[in-house]
Image (tube, rainbow, N blue to C red):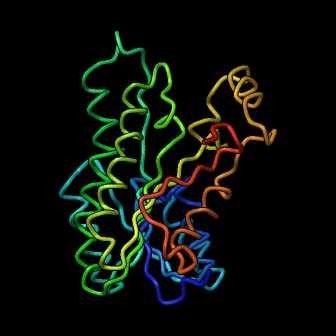
Amino acid sequence: MSLAGRVALVTGASQGIGQACALKLAQSGASVALAARNQEKLNQTVQNITDQGGLAAAFALDVSEEEQIKSAVKSVLAQFGKIDILINNAGITRDQLVMRMKRADWDAVLQTNLTAAYLCIQQVIGSMLKQRWGRIINITSIFGQTGQAGQANYAASKAGLIGLTMAIAREVGSRNITCNAVAPGFIETAMTSALPDELKQTALKNIPMGRIGTPQDVANAVAFLASEDASYITGHVLNVNGGMLMG
């Protein structure tokens, strides 16, 4: 699954799944543009990649700001010359029961998790169309497929990503550009580490494989979809959930 010669842009790359994706893509030979709000963490990951002989650069980016997305993509194109692979990973949660959920928390989650993905795709698609090759991979969630109490905003944003994935796949498939989604289940990240142990144990009972997933599990799926090995797969949602959801 060599990605030699390819350039990948990963949002939310400073930690967790995004960081694992950036490292995996770099190990597969891609040059990687890492984007997130935390410049210090980005720089550490870039250093990690370069220490292993890879090529990477950090770009400070708050994906909730449209102008920052436009500016960051321009900077990536200026430095690397193209963008072959886009990983829309940046995401936030603002959990609350719907009867108490503030409109601001709904808007923030939809803006960061869904609208930002559309904006990033819009900014990179020109580069992909020009070379008639591209890979767009949206990180959705099992809760975009099943729903989750207390996460109406998050579940809606992740379900929206699945619809966006299929629409883009239909739009650009004839230009040798694929668009797929990866739907993680329960993954050990900073977002899930804050959850009560009781909730983690309950989740574990619903995972046939008997373990919580790792960011590396997700990154492996992303690297596959970004490669030539997945050239005839598009509009697909790849579940990485240990069997938590089947069918």
- Assign the C terminus to one quadrant of the image: top right
Q: Is residue 133 above or below residue 236?
A: below
User: What is the residue that sits farthest to the front in this orientation?
Assistant: 247
User: What is the residue that sits farthest to the right in this orientation?
Assistant: 210
Left or right, 199 with respect to 128, comes to right
Nearer to us in this view, 203 or 102:
203
User: Residue 226, percent across and down?
Assistant: 51, 72
Q: How many numbered tags mark residues here? A: 0
User: What is the residue that sits farthest to the top in this orientation?
Assistant: 99
Q: Is residue 194 above or below residue 220?
A: above
Left or right, 200 with respect to 129, comes to right
Residue at (52%, 57%) from the top-left corner? 18
Q: Is residue 47 above or below residue 66?
A: below
User: Residue 203, percent across and down?
Assistant: 70, 28
User: Residue 163, percent across and down?
Assistant: 34, 47
Residue at (61%, 70%) from the top-left corner? 24
User: Residue 219, percent across and down?
Assistant: 60, 61
Q: Quadrant of residue 157?
A: top left
Q: Quadrant of residue 189?
A: top right
Left or right, 237 with respect to 53, comes to left
User: What is the residue that sits farthest to the bottom in this orientation?
Assistant: 5
